[in-house]
Image: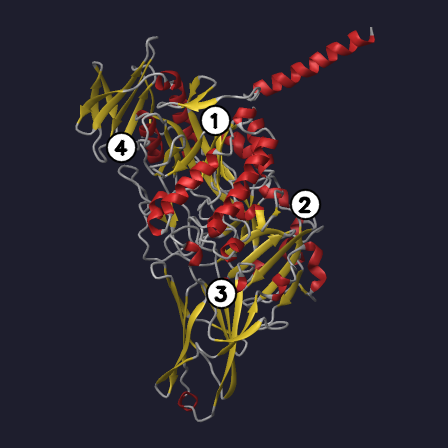
Amino acid sequence: MKRMKILPVRLIVLFIFFSFCCFNSFCLAANVTYDHRSLIIDGRRKLFLSASIHYPRSVPAMWPELIQAAKEGGLNTIESYVFWSGHELSPGKYSFEGRYDLVKFVKTVQQAGMYMLLRIGPFVAAEYNYGGVPVWLHYIPGSVFRSYSKPFMSYMQKFMTLIVDMMKKEKLFASQGGPIILAQVENEYQWYEQFYKGGKEYAMWAASMAVSQNTGVPWIMCQQYDAPDPVIDTCNSFYCDQFTPHSSKMPKIWTENWPGWFKKFGAPDPHRPHQDVAFSVARFIQKGGSVHNYYMYHGGTNFGRTSGDFVTTSYDYDAPIDEYGLPRNPKWGHLKELHEAIMLCEGVLLNSDPINLSLGPSQEADVYADSSGACAAFLSNTDNATDTTVVFRNVSYFLPAWSVSILSDCKNVVFNTAKVSTQTSIIEMVPEYLQQSDSSADEGSKALQWDVFKEMTGIWGEANFVKSGLVDHLNTTKDTTDYLWYTTSIIFSEDEEFLRTGSQPVLLIESKGHTLHAFINQELVQGNSTYSTGTLVFSFTALIPLKAGKNKIDLLSMTVGLPSAGPFYEWTGTGLTSVKIKGFNNRTLDFSSYNWTYKIGVQGEDLRIYNPDNLTNVNWTPTSEPPKNQPLTWYKAVVNEPVGDEPIGLDMLHMGKGQAWLNGEPIGRYWDKRSSIDDHCVQECDYRGTFNQQKCLTGSGEPTQRWYHVPRSWFKPSGNILVIFEEKGGDPTRIRFSRRNISIPFPV
């Protein structure tokens, strides 16, 4: 009798378990194959609309809502790279915690009932520091990134196998009942093959190595138009409707449709009109595409020092979901309607081949029909200026310029890419004073107490080494820090002409990047700087106050991220290459070959005083009036969490350049660098016509980035430790938290 009582309980548990699995679409192992029309899941063709969401560019607390926002936006798949440098911190030392908890991210996708496209790479580009490849790998003897280099290939295969085995252990491939339906090896490599000895052999080896992992799902290589069977080549571009895979047996896959673009410090804001994004997607589906991915759907944040060279901490990308995790309308809503219209056509799209009909010089129809009588049509007008009316099946249809109409039954228009019904959301950053922890809100900034620590200028502690000549910055720091001090001294007699006449010599510095601060006799000097992305030369010029006797020159060289792509990009040098002073009896003296003393990093960073556990490593000076415009200064305040539940940005408009942390978490680099007033920006962007990243720029003469995302999950109700390292000087009393509010206006 006891056994009969227990048995129904077991059955109930099993029923609940299998119901949960099946509800989330992943109940049993799936057979993933493909043909010329689409991926095939257990014998059924399926259309995949995907969203790029990079797990390290948000935080675990945000993942469920981001994935849900993609699902509510009409998508069924999530895509992410795997970020090697964030996982293998040194050879064989791995990290899969916090923002880098890859398994948790994939399981979150699974729990949402969505599929996963895992781009293991492990090279990612992605405007990410060093393209996501660990810096230490550059210093392994014989290693040449992305080449037929045995050391590089060995470490690459070891890491890829580690990731594949990790996914297998957790049963996350579709062949095991998991969400991963596609995996990617390498990334946009074919064009680079020509620069490497054995480039083609490397690409073929990478494909073969990936297939040998036996994941049970297809592999892809984007922009690799000779990928060997069974690897599928895919397209990355603003438009991929004209792309065809190299084999007629393979489906048409678009791995990166760029709905916006990334931003660099000192550059204006790029934007892509939502009508054009929708047009590009509709054209791709019209021309037989069946797997489409937005890169990015949520761009997120380059926390800490993870951005590529000069790339801003914000990786917002003008994506349908903004950096803070909120829908960007009308883009998000307009694309949601597009996705719904496309999915109405899924069955007939994937089970028939299109018939193309000309409707005019720049107008055409692609018609899909099957034996059941189902029919769908895409009518397009690729003229970039002229609206027109076309006749299709004896019915007239109005087609705006540069648009596609979707007829889910070959009769009724369910969506046109140029017609927008979603209202534009209003974004407001609502500022509030930093509030002293445990003080009341109405005390405001007057109650805020700061602790201040002033860095030494130049060499602190013992020097790392002394050397004749200027060394390469990256080869010296190994990217353990942004900072490297170059220090020397010069002596002038009192009879120097510039001392008698009162003129000031000119300091002339050239560097491979990325920027620097110059100190003469402990004082920061202001100068003019330029950086040429073409020649990769940073130039700095400044009048300097020299004196009779000994003069100390301290130059703080800084990197702002490392290159993320390009032939032999890991060999790109950084740091000072020439130091001269002009103005000695009409002479220019070259100090480049002098003896220079070197120190890696700055003291506070070395002592990790941004970490709550290390705050006592230096002597802080408490004050309610922190120094302003003082370089090389650390500021610390203990603050309350901002009110409400809106996302938070740290307003750094009145600070100079540096880094910020909250409770030891790296907010990232900040910089007050402005875009040029000569940048060709627009008041309103015409969506019609071919888009490129320079077409729709805004923000001429404005700071490249003002607000820096601080995830809500990093806050405690009180006792939050905000630490700022200011390199060149700013006003910390004007730092604010800002709550990001988005509202939809009422119709007039």
* Residue identified by numbered label 2: 716
Q: How many numbered circles are shown?
A: 4
Please rate how many residues cluster around mark 4, counting C-alpha atoms within 10 Å: few if below 14, some from 14 to 19, many from 20.
many
Q: Determine the secondary structure under disc 4.
A: loop
Q: Earlier in the sequence, mark 3 or mark 4?
A: 4
* Residue identified by numbered label 1: 76
Q: Earlier in the sequence, mark 2 or mark 4?
A: 4
Q: Nearer the viewer, mark 1 or mark 3?
A: 3
**Above or below 668: residue 529:** below
Q: Determine the secondary structure under disc 1.
A: loop
Q: Earlier in the sequence, mark 2 or mark 3?
A: 3
Q: Earlier in the sequence, mark 1 or mark 3?
A: 1
Q: Earlier in the sequence, mark 1 or mark 2?
A: 1
Question: Residue 396 or 11: which is nearer the viewer?
Answer: 11
Question: Residue 165 or 409: which is nearer the viewer?
Answer: 165
Q: Spatial distance from mark 2 to mark 3, Cα to Cα?
A: 38 Å
* Residue identified by numbered label 3: 473
Q: Spatial distance from mark 1 to mark 3, Cα to Cα?
A: 45 Å
> Do labels 2 and 3 touch, CB within 8 Å?
no
Q: Nearer the viewer, mark 1 or mark 4?
A: 1
Please rate how many residues cluster around mark 1, counting C-alpha atoms within 10 Å: few if below 14, some from 14 to 19, many from 20.
many
